[in-house]
Image: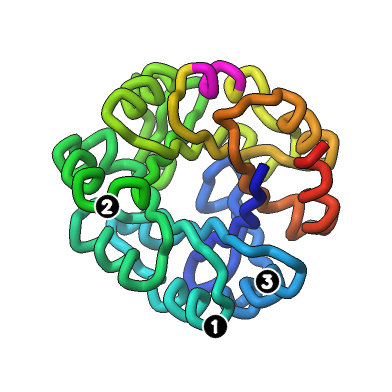
Amino acid sequence: MKLYPALDILDGHVVRLSQGDFDRRTTYAADPLAVAEQWAKAGADRLHIVDLDGARAGHPVNLDSVRAIVQETGLEVQVGGGLRSHEAIDAALAAGAGRVIIGTAAFNDPYLLNEALERHGEKIAVSVDARNGLVATAGWLEATDLQTVDAVRALDNRGVSTIIYTSVDRDGMLAGADLDTVRTVASALRGELIYAGGIGSLDDLRALAQLDSPRLTAVVIGKALYEARFTLAEASAALCT
């Protein structure tokens, strides 16, 4: 199973939010490139970058940082946050993203998603961010009445090859993965599932690996790495359990 260190950018800094709350942030560094270089030196070969400014504004804000990270580190990156138009998607790909993550627009603008899939295929992933089992949009600030599993099935039927499921209720809380939902969501997919939210220990990673789901192909880890709960190498080993 692959491992993506998370790199969330807000006001130009590397931060982590608790449960998606912009007012509950922890700032870890002032320079996203320096942090990306640290992860590369630690053995990472990919990053999960979220432009939180972009998610809140509705358009990308930190693509210069994405471009610098790709150029200076050579890491494979997937990028989300504010990608709600074809121009924004094209700009993120031009900045060096190997895959772009559509969130809000996948639910509010079905034509955009359909055209993005036609133009870019597997370079398009969709983020399904859930609070209390319901999809959250607009940088996690707005709730919908769409059930998580129903959303995943619908996206899979539309040809989305990669779903990134985030348990917003657990994100940044270090309280463990949402194993039951992961199991249910994975069973509803034909494509790939990437999980994020709540990872706090190596046991959490081992539990995900032991689900033994062929659809669960990667995990995004944020706060636990920044708080040095374990190393990148230890996390990679746990996912191979």
Q: What is the spatial separation of the Cα atoms under label 1 and label 2, in whole angstroms?
A: 25 Å
Q: What is the spatial separation of the Cα atoms under label 2 and label 3, in whole angstroms?
A: 27 Å
The residue lying at 64 percent from left, 57 percent from top is: 5
The residue type indicated by label 3 comes to: Ala
Q: Position of residue 206 (x, y in %)?
A: 80, 34
Q: Nearer the viewer, residue 21 or 238?
A: 238
Mark 3 element type = helix
Q: For label 2, count other residues whose C-alpha is less than 10 Å away and answer few (under 14), some (14-19) or many (20+).
A: some
Vertical position of residue 213 compared to residue 171: above or below: above
Q: Nearer the viewer, residue 134 or 80?
A: 80
Question: Which sits earlier in the primary sequence, circle 2 or circle 3?
Answer: 3
The residue lying at 19 percent from left, 35 percent from top is: 110
Question: Which sits earlier in the primary sequence, circle 1 or circle 2?
Answer: 1
Q: Position of residue 223 (x, y in %)?
A: 70, 52
Name the chief secondary structure element in magenta.
Answer: helix
Q: Which residue is mark 3?
A: 40
Q: Which residue is mark 1?
A: 72
Vertical position of residue 19 compared to residue 182: above or below: below
Q: For label 3, count other residues whose C-alpha is less than 10 Å away and answer few (under 14), some (14-19) or many (20+).
A: some
The residue type indicated by label 2 comes to: His
Q: Which residue is mark 2?
A: 120
Whether label 3 touches label 1, CB < 8 Å: no
The residue type indicated by label 1 comes to: Glu
Q: Which residues are magenta?
A: 183-187
Which callout, 1 or 2, points to the residue nearer the camera? 2
Q: Is residue 14 magenta?
A: no
Q: Is residue 25 left or right of residue 131?
A: right
